[in-house]
Amino acid sequence: MNPQRISDLQGAVWHTSSYSNNGSGCVERGRLLSGRQGVRDTKDRTRGTLVFAAGPWQEFITAVRDGGLS
């Protein structure tokens, strides 16, 4: 995976996961202007962002919903 440039993340709309709790495990998902999805640690954004193309992101979401990652 190539590291993302800051400019790739500018303009992203970030949302904290509804599964994040108040103590730990906080994750944000961001829709990037390129149509890709970013995932980052809410508490330590300096650790970087994982970026996924739309297709693999949707496959991941479907697998989670269907219980395929348990």
Image (spheres, rainbow, N blue to C red):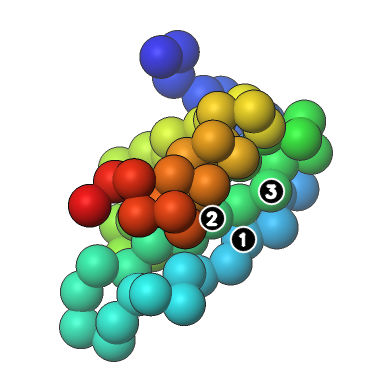
- The secondary structure type at the circle numbered 3 is strand
The answer to whether residue 66 is above or below residue 57 is below
- Circle 2 crowding by C-alpha within 10 Å: few under 14, some 14–19, many from 20: many
- The secondary structure type at the circle numbered 2 is strand
Q: Mark 3 points at which residue?
A: 31
- The secondary structure type at the circle numbered 1 is strand
Q: Name the residue under label 2.
A: 29
Task: Give, as a three-letter code, the residue at label 3.
Answer: Arg
Task: Give, as a three-letter code, the residue at label 1.
Answer: Trp
Q: Residue at x 34, y 45 (%)?
A: 68
**Residue 40 rendering spot, x and y as whole percentages:** 41, 50
Alpha carbon of mark 2 to alpha carbon of mark 1: how far? 6 Å
Check contact, mark 1 vs mark 3: CB within 8 A: no
**Residue 29 rendering spot, x and y as whole percentages:** 54, 55
Task: Give, as a three-letter code, the residue at label 2.
Answer: Arg
- Between disc 2 and disc 1, whose residue precedes? 1
Check contact, mark 2 vs mark 1: CB within 8 A: yes
Quarter of the view holding residue 55: top right
Check contact, mark 3 vs mark 2: CB within 8 A: yes
